[in-house]
């Protein structure tokens, strides 16, 4: 395809301290045939004004101001307003390498992939930049390999990629034809994981680009570290909805095993949040024991799923299966301190 148009969607909500840097990293891409869609999701800080100023500076930028509805809905607004051949989604407090679009496009055009996944770095408040490990693995998946290998691998540790839509480029025509859209994160705890299951069931070619191109800023006050009393309940809803989707899409059993690994990771994160909270010690203990004894969680601790975990989490969930809650509490404390 000669000089295809690439749409870049950036959902924006109250990130005035980071937004300029994010937009600049997109504007300065070495591939220039871009349509940059800034979706102001009802921001109450100076983000709307920052967006409008950028649209004056660069004719490739389109700004959509809308009522706040969350990340998933903002991405859907971006899809509805996009006209490109390909589409990328970037979070508004992160940045990307200047060659990201060009390298993704080259990979997609060379392989015919409807999805190109790439790697990222964690950037911390103190300036540390930690690159994700890039394993030596298969790079192109065709036909049933997308559902049997690529999709399950995103949910666990196989490729070191994860499910984030921010580190993937999608064929926009295939995406629009599929009618798949993001669910609200207010409805399902990982809109990215659910989107991957729905969309990748429609994909015939997927590719991995073995380069770290995305810079994920890990703020010390990130919402992902905030204790939420209903987190375990939402994790269970996530698992139930995912398993329903797997049945509806007739995806292989391997996908259900790997999505359960993802569910375990979310459950472990919920337990860490309890331990990191400001709750009194007695209440922390009570809530951790309740999480440990969750019937849905315990029912998923089977041999097939546990074998997919890293050594440390396999040990933790094996102890949990044996109801050794005292040791599990100790391991959570050690993990949080670490």
Image (cartoon, rainbow, N blue to C red):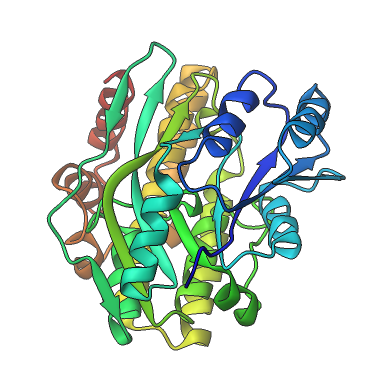
Residue 199 visible here: yes
- Dividing the picture into quadrants, the one containing residue 263 is bottom left
Q: Quadrant of the C terminus?
A: top left
Viewer-side residue, 30 vs 145: 30
Image height of 8 relative to 273, above or below? below
Relative to 98, is 308 on the left or the right? left
> Given the current orientation, which residue lies at the most extreme front position?
2
Residue drawn 70% across and 22% down? Answer: 16
Relative to 180, is 293 on the left or the right? left
Viewer-side residue, 155 vs 43: 43
> Given the current orientation, which residue lies at the most extreme top position?
126
Q: Position of residue 267 (x, y in %)?
A: 42, 47
Q: Position of residue 21 (x, y in %)?
A: 57, 25
Q: Position of residue 135 (x, y in %)?
A: 16, 51
Residue drawn 41% across and 46% down? Answer: 100
Relative to 13, is 152 on the left or the right? left
Viewer-side residue, 321 vs 91: 91
Image height of 218 relative to 80, above or below? above
Q: Position of residue 272 (x, y in %)?
A: 41, 32
Residue 227 visible here: no
Residue drawn 61% across and 35% down? Answer: 92
């Amino acid at each position: 395809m000669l000089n295809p148009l690439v749409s870049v969607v950036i959902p924006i909500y109250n990130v005035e301290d980071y937004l300029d840097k994010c937009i600049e990293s997109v504007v300065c891409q070495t591939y220039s045939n871009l349509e940059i869609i800034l979706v102001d999701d009802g921001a109450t800080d100076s983000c709307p004004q920052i967006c409008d100023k950028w649209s004056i500076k660069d004719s490739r930028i389109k700004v959509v101001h809308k009522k706040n509805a969350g990340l998933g809905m903002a991405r859907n607004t971006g899809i509805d307003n996009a006209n490109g051949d390909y589409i990328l989604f970037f979070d508004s407090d992160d940045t990307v390498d200047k060659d990201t679009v060009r390298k993704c496009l080259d990979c997609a055009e060379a392989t015919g992939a409807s999805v190109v996944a790439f790697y990222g770095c964690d950037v911390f408040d103190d300036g540390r930049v930690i690159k994700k490990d890039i394993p030596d693995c298969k790079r192109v998946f065709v036909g049933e390999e997308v559902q049997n290998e690529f999709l399950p691998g995103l949910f666990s540790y196989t490729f070191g990629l994860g499910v984030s839509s921010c580190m993937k480029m999608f064929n926009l025509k295939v995406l629009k034809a599929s009618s798949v859209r993001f669910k609200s994160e207010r409805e399902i705890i990982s809109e990215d994981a659910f989107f991957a299951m729905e969309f990748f069931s429609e994909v015939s070619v997927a590719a991995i680009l073995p380069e770290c191109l995305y810079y994920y800023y890990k703020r010390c006050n990130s919402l992902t570290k905030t204790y939420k009393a209903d987190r375990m309940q939402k994790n269970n809803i996530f698992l139930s909805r995912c398993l329903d989707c797997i049945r509806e899409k007739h995806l292989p059993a391997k996908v259900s095993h790997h999505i359960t690994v993802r569910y375990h990771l979310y459950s472990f994160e919920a337990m860490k949040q309890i331990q990191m909270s400001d709750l009194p010690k007695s209440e922390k203990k009570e809530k951790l024991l309740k999480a440990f004894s969750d019937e849905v969680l315990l029912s998923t601790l089977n041999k097939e799923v546990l074998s997919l975990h890293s050594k440390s989490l396999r040990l933790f969930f094996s102890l949990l299966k044996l109801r050794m809650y005292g040791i599990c509490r100790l391991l959570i404390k050690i993990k949080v301190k670490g």
